[in-house]
Amino acid sequence: LSVNLVTGGAGFIGANLVPRLLERGHRVIVADNLSRGRRIFLEAFEAHPCFQFVEVDCAEAENLLQTILPLHRNKAVECVWHMAANSDIPAGVADPRVDLKDTFHSTFGVLETMRALGIPCLRFASSSAVYGDLKDTAISESSGPLNPISNYGAMKLASEALISAAVESFLKRADIFRFPNVVGTPATHGVLLDLIRKAMASPGGFDILGDGTQKKIYLHVQDLISAMLFIGAQDIGRHNIINIGPSDEGITVREIAQKIRSKVAPNAVLRFGMESRGWVGDVPRFRYDTTRLAALGWTPQLGSAAAIDKAIADIMLQKNASREAPP
Amino acid sequence: LSVNLVTGGAGFIGANLVPRLLERGHRVIVADNLSRGRRIFLEAFEAHPCFQFVEVDCAEAENLLQTILPLHRNKAVECVWHMAANSDIPAGVADPRVDLKDTFHSTFGVLETMRALGIPCLRFASSSAVYGDLKDTAISESSGPLNPISNYGAMKLASEALISAAVESFLKRADIFRFPNVVGTPATHGVLLDLIRKAMASPGGFDILGDGTQKKIYLHVQDLISAMLFIGAQDIGRHNIINIGPSDEGITVREIAQKIRSKVAPNAVLRFGMESRGWVGDVPRFRYDTTRLAALGWTPQLGSAAAIDKAIADIMLQKNASREAPP
């Protein structure tokens, strides 16, 4: 049982990680600036004796340190799950300051806090976006060159680089999880939520960004959390970079749109664009080599198509449960 | 003939690049914050009609933009040679804010300025430090994983990542030069200057960081400039990452110390340390695959040992020419 700091704990991934840590008996401190995360996602745990929430921007290193310091003096934090980041890729393409601050400076702030307090272990939400567009190669953790095509991917790679230097200098352990597209609830953004909203808003027909041939792999968030907990429990050296994902070849945007049509708007006409990329920074295809994770003994329960099916059902439930506008 | 902005133009590499651009008839604007660079290195060009110096910190994006804007309106800048960076690796290990600002934020500021002004072409001084310690593999541009072990290397990799996203978004061309250790004058830091200073200060004997077995490749700065000019003149696509270096296996710190002893302090006792690394962030050995550059048709005139010989002679001349304390 350990004391865990979850940055971005009120966001999509964090809000799924927190209960899984609590149910294993760990203490959890969530640090979130609530720029994209929502405190309501953590409502069920507010009264939990092992849960604590602090509102702080991890990109402000000195603030973060001063906020964590008294908590750390009370019970020493052993592990930081650094999930805080900008998650809106197009927003970062439009203004690189978004990813600079929320994705990169947050990592800098976390590392400075860990160095100052002597917190030994970091688990980091990195991304397949660090690879850029490697075309049809099956991407493994040692693939190169790493040419990210979005500021989001660039600042994830920059964060990995900073962590790498910190492992040499003071960290005792760092696990770098390279996520694929992750789906599930509480959904705040992403292709599924976009398409479901469009289908609900105009059941007669809706537009899809790109020509629909973009083929990607998807992981359900519950599988992702399982993988991170599994990797964290392995005795595998100080600096581990691991692709997390299904072993299938993925599913196209066209297939996703058809699934959503059948669930939400059976009579909708699907209107595709002309471009193979949905937006600047979109990688139209990729295959993911997950041999390293499989060799450790973990495989996801859901493949890409099943993850999408479950996530669509999750999001519909979330929408039905809410009287408000969708989050 | 083009208009070139050389950031860090008053530093070691920049001060060697400026005359080579001027002698080809190009216009040169040097932007330097003079934190490590010295205006005296550019003294010979101050009166040149095609030369201009502006003192500005590239890490301050808005300042940089406002400084370059009127010059760009006068004559459009076509190419930025981004050489500005912290060059003191141990300083960045001690305080990561040094590399964050001088190496990474300077790149961010340069890219923001290029985006705002529509400057098409970037040439960037990257480093073999992005590779970290890949042991005995011959490092090529697509080697991975990239696990830098210094904040210097981390912030060079972070800069490369940002440039990669900028190529996708707005840059017309980016050449990323991955430098090995570069030697020559005006020397401001580095193993040669350190050892020469020690040998001059205590001709009876001096200490060497590490056990002397660190084996590295070295490139003379004149060869480096030739390589950058050569690559820049090639018609080779929009995003080029190229190792620049000699094709030999390098030379050990012990051999370098012996060369310096023979030139400076023939009776000195060489006192080696116990560690195979000279300092945190030092990569003890590496081999460099320069096939890509050789295939373009360029090879250096001097191998590692000859580059060291010439650089020792350069530095001794620099010292003799100066009545002041060594720079």
Image (cartoon, coloured by chain):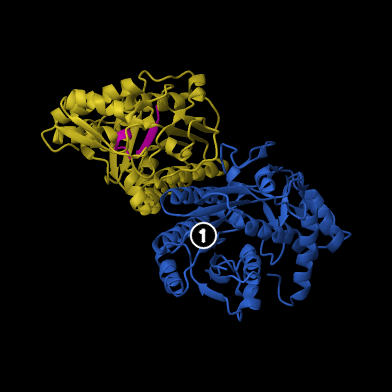
Chain colours: A yellow, B blue
Q: Nearer the viewer, residue A165 or A241?
A: A241
Position above or below: B183 against B153: below
Position above or below: B273 against B18: above
Task: Please state, as top left, top right, bottom left or bottom right, where the N terminus of chain A lies in the image.
Answer: top left
Q: Is residue A92 left or right of residue B72?
A: left
In the rendered image, residue A293, in percent from the top left (x then y), is placed at: 48, 24
Residue B309 occupies quadrant: bottom right
Magenta-span inclusion, residue A9: yes
Element type where label 1 sits in the image: helix
Provide the chain ID for the residue under circle 1: B
Position above or below: B165 against A304: below
Count the marks: 1
Magenta-span inclusion, residue B48: no
Question: Which residue appears farthest toward the right when viewing the image?
Answer: B267
Question: Which residue appears farthest toward the bottom when viewing the image?
Answer: B47
In the rendered image, residue B116, in percent from the top left (x then y), is placed at: 39, 62
Residue found 35% across the figure and 48% down from its top: A92
The residue type indicated by label 1 comes to: Asp
Residue B88, visible in the rendered structure:
no
Residue under label 1: B102
Q: Residues within 10 Å of mark 1 (few under 14, many from 20)?
A: many
Q: Which residues are magenta?
A: A1-13
Q: Is residue B4 left or right of residue B279?
A: left
Q: Nearer the viewer, residue A288 or A5?
A: A288
Q: Nearer the viewer, residue A252 or A3?
A: A252
Residue found 29% across the figure and 43% down from its top: A54
Q: Nearer the viewer, residue B32 or A57?
A: B32
In the rendered image, residue A139, in percent from the top left (x then y), is placed at: 50, 31
Task: Please state, as top left, top right, bottom left or bottom right, where the C terminus of chain A lies in the image.
Answer: top left
In the rendered image, residue A174, in percent from the top left (x then y), is placed at: 49, 35
